[in-house]
Each structure stands twice: as structure tokens, then as C-alpha cells.
Amino acid sequence: MKTPRLIFLTLLLVPATSFAQSSTPAESVQRTPPSVVASLAPPSDAVSVPTGYVLRMNDQVAVEVFGEEDLRTSTRLNGEGNLSLPLLGSVHLAGLTLAQAAAKITELYGRDYLVNPRVNVTLVGYAKRRFTILGQVSRPGSYEMPEGSPDGVDLLEAIAMAGGYTRIAAPERVSVRRRSAKGEDEILRVDAKRLAKRGGENFQVRPGDTVTVAESLF
């Protein structure tokens, strides 16, 4: 009759062992949601931005709200400088730096939709900005500003983009027509020959400028 007692003791031990195993606290592992990890990486097509750059009409930006994949967007500011964003609609961003734009969007999302949102705004494409170069250059015409120099390009670089001077060019007589802040055209005279010799000086061609290289008189 020893067998029943052995079975009874075994049954008593099994629940105790199970309780001991279940009462052992599981190791806590904190994991970052995959969507947040993906958001932390900047877009692969982001472009370099000069310090203090302010957004302009037709600039293309990517907006990411960490952990909110449905709110991610990449589009251009419209002709009024506004960006269309999920939930928020049209938001005016022209004239703001990227940091200021992110702060504004953060405030708007946090006001009615999200708790402590984290927003990142990245420039992925400049608005098309062009200048025109005419006169005694090999390839006169209209040119886009280089991606890394959206606000201006060195005059000598602009001339190089147009194929350089013709054999009858007068580099010392270059004129630049520029629209002033008052909306009036002004003509600037530049001696590109002197700039090339001195090396340290430069003249910036701005978007909308028309550069004309004069013909030599001799």
C-alpha cells in the first residue's frame, strides 16, 4: 500500500514546482517599435542645406512624425508657401528654417491630435532656381543653380557652366541685371578678369539674374 502514498506526494510536489516557475519574474526587454527605428534615419534623398536656410515656394520637404507612419509625407510647398499635411491640411512654412518648421508642425499636431509628438522636417529638393547667361560664352542660355548652392553661384563658376568664354569675349566687361527688393531692375558691372586674377574675391550670381559677357572691342 506504499504506492498510493507515493502518488499523493508526487501530486503535491507538481503544483508547488509549477508555482515556483510561474512566480519567477520574466526578464524585461524593452523594444523600440520598428516604425520609430525607421523614422530616426533621415531620408536617403535628403540634400545638404546651408546654415540658416529658409524654406521657399516649391521647395520639396519630407515630414516625419516618429511612430506615426500614416503621417509621413514628402511633397513641395505650393505657390503660396504652404504644405499639405495629413490631419492638419494646409500649413504655411515658407520663410521658416527647417527647425522652425518642425517646431510649428509639432505644436499643431500636439494641440489636437497627438501627445508629445516628435517631428522631423528634411529638405529633399530645392525649388528650381535659374539664372541666364548671354553674350560671349560658348553655350548661352538659362541654367539651374547647383544643388549645393541654391541661393547663389560664383560668377566664374556660372561662366564655366556656360562653356567658358568665346575667343572674342571681354571678361573685364560683364554686366548683371538683377531685380532689387523694390521690384526694380538694376545693372551691376563686374570685372571677371580681375576676379580670376585675385582668386580670393568672388561675385555671387543669384536666382533670376541675367549675366551678359561683352564682346571685346579689339
Image: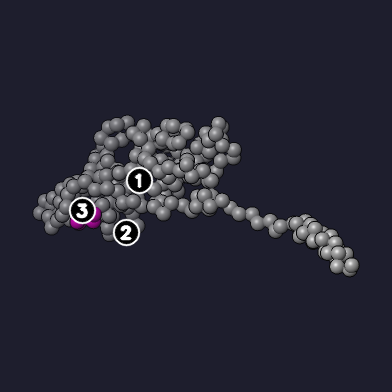
The three-letter amino acid code for the residue at tag 2 is Gly
Q: Distance between the residues labelled 1 and 3?
A: 21 Å
Q: Distance between the residues labelled 3 and 2?
A: 20 Å
162 inside magenta stretch: yes
Q: Nearer the viewer, mark 1 or mark 2?
A: 1
Q: Quadrant of the N terminus?
A: bottom right
Nearer the observer, 102 or 4: 4
* Secondary structure of the residue carrying numbered label 2: loop
Name the outermost residue toward the front.
Answer: 1
Residue 55, quarter of picture: top left
Looking at marks 1 and 3 on the same chain, the residue that comes earlier in the sequence is marked by: 1
Which residue is identified by label 2?
Answer: 199
Left or right of 59 on screen, residue 189:
left
The relative height of residue 44 versus residue 69 in the rendered view (above or below) is: below
Give residue 163's position: percent from left, percent from top: 19, 56
Can residue 107 be seen in this snapshot?
A: no
Q: In which quarter of the image is the C terminus?
A: bottom left
Dot 1 alpha-carbon crowd within 10 angstroms: few under 14, some 14 to 19, many 20 or more:
many
Left or right of 47 on screen, residue 101:
right
Point out which mark residue 126 bears.
1
Left or right of 11 on screen, residue 67:
left
Which residue is identified by label 3?
Answer: 162
The three-letter amino acid code for the residue at tag 1 is Tyr
